[in-house]
Image: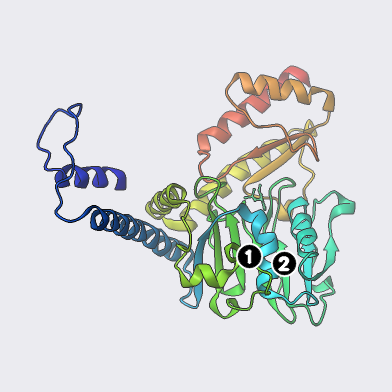
Amino acid sequence: RHQHQHQAHLHQMRGHHDPHPRSPPEPARIPGSGLQLRRRARQSAREQFSSIIQKAESDLRTLLNIPPEYSVLFLQGGATTQFAAIPLNLCKPDDKVDYLVTGSWGDKAFKEAQKFSKPKVIWSGKSEKYTKIPAFEQLEQSPDAKYLHICANETIHGVEFKTYPTPKNGLLIADMSSNFCSKPVDVSKFGIIYAGAQKNVGPSGVTIVIIRKDLIGNAQEITPVMLDFKIHDDNNSLYNTPPCYGIYMCGLVFEDLLEQGGLAGIEKKNKKKAELLYNAIDGSNGFYRCPVEKSVRSLMNVPFTLEKSELEGEFIKEAAKENMVQLKGHRSVGGMRASIYNAMPLAGVEKLVAFMKIFQAKHA
Ligand code: PMP
């Protein structure tokens, strides 16, 4: 839509009334020196993009009901970059921080934090193959930890926090890369929420950071400018060339989510899709299995295995013939994984479930 408006605007600027789009455009006739023209062109691009990023931010604020004391940053480098940026911005090198490791992504975040702070894993689900989330009362949090880090949805293992722990003596920080904007979230419970855009809200390359403003401005001396939240906050995420196209796309997705009834509306749809798939797995008399504890099963990523694991290759091949692709589980866990992000319609899940029933009937 923006692009059309933009093209129409250019068209007017060029004095075009030619109905034939193939005729070559006339050069712009704007008075002024070449230098002035170039400056004006640059300013207007920045101005035009500012309105796009501001609209995207304002729609995201509406969607997540983000309180005014939080900044929204549109950054680059993926969630992986935030694994380093967060301890760099919040800690001195000797500061203690706590990590809950409920899957591979939480583990990666912890490992990166070791370079810039003194993180401790206060609970790990590794020995149970990352199928659980601990009871929060049992957690032994470090009394002097600056923050507690969680991965709100473990993309590979399909484990999702349904409620959140309260850090004893600090802040809660969540990697929401794979369930961002899939359901309402009480932002005020968190010091920082961060997410790579590519699952639910836009193209890879855009990373969104929602941060309580009082946490900005204490980065370690060695922090590169591109990782310093203050630099980006002071410049409204336009310190250097932003990922314009990606942010523009995120903005369109936010508009669409609002039109769909906001995040409560999306959550309802996501629950229906996930329920259908988990019911099919649980109702298969053990032919299909989901290893994740029922109360923490992800609405976004549904891992499952076949009792007859030798049939998994055939399952994936047969499904691909019906255009259901990317069902192979991550190489670290095997089996299958259906990622049913916001953009997956109910009909897609219905089709998978119908296929699963036919496959079972053939091989039971
Ligand atoms: N955290 C989670 C939960 C993820 O799913 C991913 C990517 N799949 C990452 C972090 C890493 O994100 P990126 O590739 O954007 O760096």
Looking at the rendered image, the quarter that the N terminus falls into is top left
Quarter placement of the C terminus: top right
- Of mark 1 and mark 2, the one earlier in the sequence is 2
**Quick one: SS at disc 1?**
loop
Image quadrant assignment for residue 28: top left
- Can residue 171 be seen by looking at this rendering? yes
Image: 180 above or below 216 = above
Q: Nearer the viewer, residue 289 or 245?
A: 245
Q: Which mark is residue 149?
A: 2
Q: Position of residue 209 (x, y in %)?
A: 56, 63
Q: Nearer the viewer, residue 310 or 278?
A: 310
* Residue visible at 73% across and 17% down in the picture: 362
Ligand 1 within 8 Å, label 1 CB? no
Residue identified by numbered label 1: 224
Q: Nearer the viewer, residue 17 or 141?
A: 17
Cα distance between the residues tagged 1 and 2: 22 Å
Residue beneath the point at 81% across and 77% down = 94
Q: What colour-coding does the image apply? A: rainbow
* Label 2 lies in ligand 1 vicinity (Cβ under 8 Å): no
Q: Is residue 224 shown left or right of residue 57? A: right
Q: Are marks 1 and 2 in contact (CB under 8 Å)?
A: no
Residue 41 position within the rendered picture, expressed as x and y whole percent measured from the top left: 28, 54
SS at mark 2 in the image: strand
Specify few, some or many for label 2: CA neighbours under 10 Å numbering under 14, 14-19, or 20 or more: many
